[in-house]
Amino acid sequence: MKRFNIFLLLVFGNLVAQNTSLVNEAKVLPTIDGDVINDKAWEGISTINTFTQKSPDEGNPSTEQT
């Protein structure tokens, strides 16, 4: 029974998988100095702004900008 449950989890687990996003490779290492806005490591990096809510209204667009 335990093996069957694990099998079901592996087979159907990706039905509830979350969306994926493109990951950018760092060409320049960030400088850890507290100045994030002017750091060259973040120039040209695409942003992700398609977040959705988990609670209270699951699936709706986020109400706060991150």
Image (spheres, helix red, strand yellow):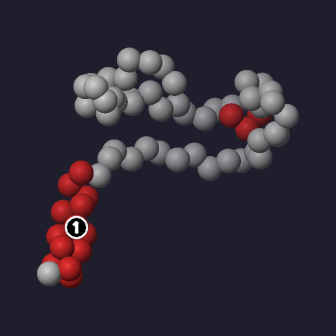
Q: Quadrant of residue 35?
A: top right
Q: Amino acid at mark 1?
A: Leu
Dot 1 lies on which element? helix
For the point 77% across and 41% down, the residue is 30
User: Vertical placement of 64 versus 25: above or below?
Assistant: above
In the image: residue 45, left or right of residue 35: left
Badge 1 density bin: few <14, some 14–19, many ≥20, Cα 10 Å: few
Residue 65 appears anywhere in the view = yes
Most distant residue in the right direction:
33
User: Vertical placement of 11 versus 39: above or below?
Assistant: below
In front of the other: 55 or 16 = 55
Q: Which residue is identified by label 1?
A: 9
Residue 7 appears anywhere in the view = no
For the point 60% across and 35% down, the residue is 45
The picture places residue 49, in percent across and down from the top left corner, at: 44, 27
User: Vertical placement of 3 versus 59: above or below?
Assistant: below
Q: Quadrant of the N terminus?
A: bottom left
For the point 21% across and 82% down, the residue is 3
The picture places residue 17, in percent across and down from the top left corner, at: 29, 52
In the image: residue 3, left or right of residue 37: left
In front of the other: 26 or 55 = 55
